[in-house]
Image: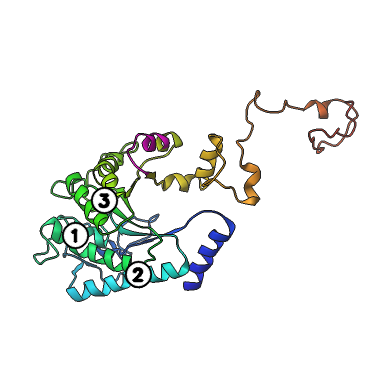
Amino acid sequence: MKASRRLLVDFVHGETDAKIGMQLGHSGPKGSTQLGWEDVDAPLTEGNWPVIGPSPIAWSPQNQVPREMTRADMDTVRDQFVRSATMAARAGFDLLELHCAHGYLLSSFLSPLTNQRTDSYGGSLAGRLRYPLSVFDAVRAVWPEDRPMTVRISATDWYEGGVDVEEAVEIARAFAEHGAAGIDVSTGQVVSEEQPAFGRSYQTPFADRIRNEIGRKYGVAVIAVGAISSYDDVNSLILAGRADLCALGRTHLYDPQWTLHAAAEQGYAGPGATWPMPFAAGSRRPQAGRTDGPRPRLELIRAGVPGTAHARWRPGVPAAGDGE
């Protein structure tokens, strides 16, 4: 695994001018589940292993009830995060993101719906923040100072009694004060009963609030995510000051070259949109209409001395039997 990570990073750095990041997380109560394209967040059909969490609260009625973590468990998991971050730094990753969203372990400490501890790691928001911040501090201490570290949060649980935008602002503030370079603002997936309000760029209002209350004050980049799919959306969000960056996931699953294609559509060529040499010929938008490209040359086959149907016309090179 160590060698494969290094090979991956070296390939990206050697063949492109792109940066590459590592996202670190712990599945917590949502562990021991099937692959995302099978039955998302559902337990394995066999061979399940025990899961842990801040409180013995299952993700759903069909999922396992996690074992409530002890202080020793917390120390062990924190040290595992540190070890993983150390390996990521040694492999040469440019950025590290600590995953504190979507009901995974650190997220489940932040939400009062999943953290019902009665010790100093539960109760008030300060108590619920205590463990995630301790993990962040430990990881930040081993992550190179010249490389950014970001945090992904769920800015609302989309369920009554859970984290709302008011608490999300304070969560973002806490991580900013502990040295986060960016806050990646997602939402939900903390409880299975959630009632999200899906729509185009539906999570952006949360990023907007956090950017303008926290990001600008602390000099922390705020990242908008969620159903952002066009470069018009991206440009509008950035220019309006609603976010500093946009992250697009499913859009790149649909089109892995989305960023390059968006640049080509807008006639941009420069940093951030450098095409790999094998694909450089595609860096300009293909001519597709009757007015933006060479006229059809079907007459080269239909007129003149008969030739092969496979003859290929090239600009400036007369075809065999061409009377021109």
- 250 falls in the magenta region: no
What type is the residue that disc 2 sits on?
A: Val
Q: In which quadrant of the rendered view does residue 146 lie?
A: bottom left
Which portion, as a residue range, is magenta? 235-244
- 243 falls in the magenta region: yes
Mark 1, other Cα within 10 Å: few <14 / some 14–19 / many ≥20: many
Q: Residue at x 8, y 65 (%)?
A: 118
Secondary structure of the residue carrying numbered label 3: strand
Distance (Cα) linking label 1 and label 3: 13 Å
Q: Is residue 47 visible?
A: no
Distance (Cα) linking label 2 and label 3: 25 Å
Q: Nearer the viewer, mark 1 or mark 3?
A: 1
Quadrant for the C terminus in the image: top right
Position of residue 214 measured from the top left corner of the image (x, y, whole percent):
25, 46
Question: Is residue 72 shown above or below 161?
Answer: below
Q: Residue at x 27, y 70 (%)?
A: 78
Q: Residue at x 32, y 62 (%)?
A: 25
What type is the residue that disc 3 sits on?
A: Ser
Question: Is residue 224 shown above or below 6?
Answer: above
Secondary structure of the residue carrying numbered label 1: helix
Secondary structure of the residue carrying numbered label 2: helix
Applied colour scheme: rainbow
What type is the residue that disc 1 sits on?
A: Leu
Mark 3, other Cα within 10 Å: few <14 / some 14–19 / many ≥20: many
Q: Which residue is label 1 attached to?
A: 129
Q: Please tell me which of labels 2 and 1 falls first in the chain.
A: 1
Distance (Cα) linking label 2 and label 1: 20 Å
The numbered mark at residue 154 is 3
Q: Please tell me which of labels 1 and 3 falls first in the chain.
A: 1
Q: Which residue is label 2 attached to?
A: 142
